[in-house]
Image: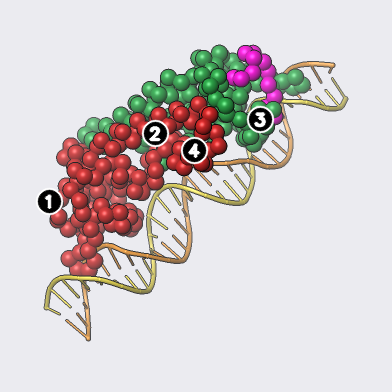
Chain colours: A green, B red, C orange, D yellow
Amino acid sequence: MMELTRKGEYAVRGIIHLARQPYGNVALLSDIAEEADIPQTFLAKIFQQFAKLGFVNSYRGSGGGFSLARPASTITLRQVVEAVEGPIAPNRCIPEADACQRSATCAVHTVWRRVQLQALEILDGVTIEELARESNIQ
Amino acid sequence: MMELTRKGEYAVRGIIHLARQPYGNVALLSDIAEEADIPQTFLAKIFQQFAKLGFVNSYRGSGGGFSLARPASTITLRQVVEAVEGPIAPNRCIPEADACQRSATCAVHTVWRRVQLQALEILDGVTIEELARESNIQ
DNA sequence: ACTAAAAAGGATAAAAATGGTCCTAAAGGC
DNA sequence: GCCTTTAGGACCATTTTTATCCTTTTTAGT
């Protein structure tokens, strides 16, 4: 349970690789995909989501590619993961409060809520800049 | 991401219902399934796993059913969830250390590890007895 | 012994999610 | 106009989820 999918892994690896470039540098999707060992067409979908959310700029045509749209220090791990995986929540009741009629009275619910808040606190506290700097990720 | 499946939800709800019975009381699967609003045949599979793991005793035949095999205060939420969902880990590298060649040097890895440890700490600290006592779960 | 009750275990299956691929269109540089 | 590169949509295979069904085994009661 609670596992990041490939999509989430690729999203994190992909944006870390982009963040390793000099800021503003436009990188080719094909280069990032190869370096990070991610299927290019899959990474394309992920970066398209990033572009819509304003994490990256995309440029079409010859000389095009992707660049970070914001400093890596302002993009958190949580933002990246939630961009592709949706809200981080250990059970289904949590994201939309209504969805669980038991919410108000269910002790189990409060436990999941605690787990969620702890996870969010950790992921909010980690930026892509830190990860790009510290990781030896390929 | 990080979501408990139905199986996990049913496992928790099911064992909480069993824990509401007087200790040692043998309850019918059909009764628990109905009370907890869980498909009976699905709950059967879950309780079979519980029986193998020693959380519950099962009795076949007329007058049979299930009872808790250990006091509810000695069964943690983590144990119940892991019984049916497998190890709790936010990404694939964590459960088996070898699986991720990047483990040693990857900063992302250490973040997931922190998330995992926090979650485990919370789930280890909650017993089925507490949940059975405090929850108004149907 | 017979019967009914109840769990055990295996096979099966529909639906959804995952993890992609492929093709055409659009945009930009030369 | 041509080449490069991303955008977007359609499609698809595999796996996981969420069950259901059937037969067997065990037990209690008569």
Question: Residue lying farthest front?
Answer: B104
- Disc 4: host chain: B
Q: Which residue is drawn at 40% across and 29% down?
A: B114
Kind of element beneath mark 3: helix
Which amino acid is tagged 1? Pro
**Is residue A56 visible in this depiction of the protein?**
no
- Marks 4 and 2, the one that precedes in the sequence: 4
Query: Tag count in the figure?
Result: 4
Which amino acid is tagged 3? Glu
Residue A93, numbered circle: none
Badge 3 is on which residue? A35
Q: How far apart are marks 3 and 4 (CA)?
A: 19 Å
Badge 2 is on which residue? B116
Which amino acid is tagged 2? Gln
Residue B22, numbered circle: 1
Is circle 1 on the same chain as circle 4?
yes
Q: Which residue is drawn at 50% across and 28% down?
A: B108
Q: Residue at x 24, y 48 (%)?
A: B15
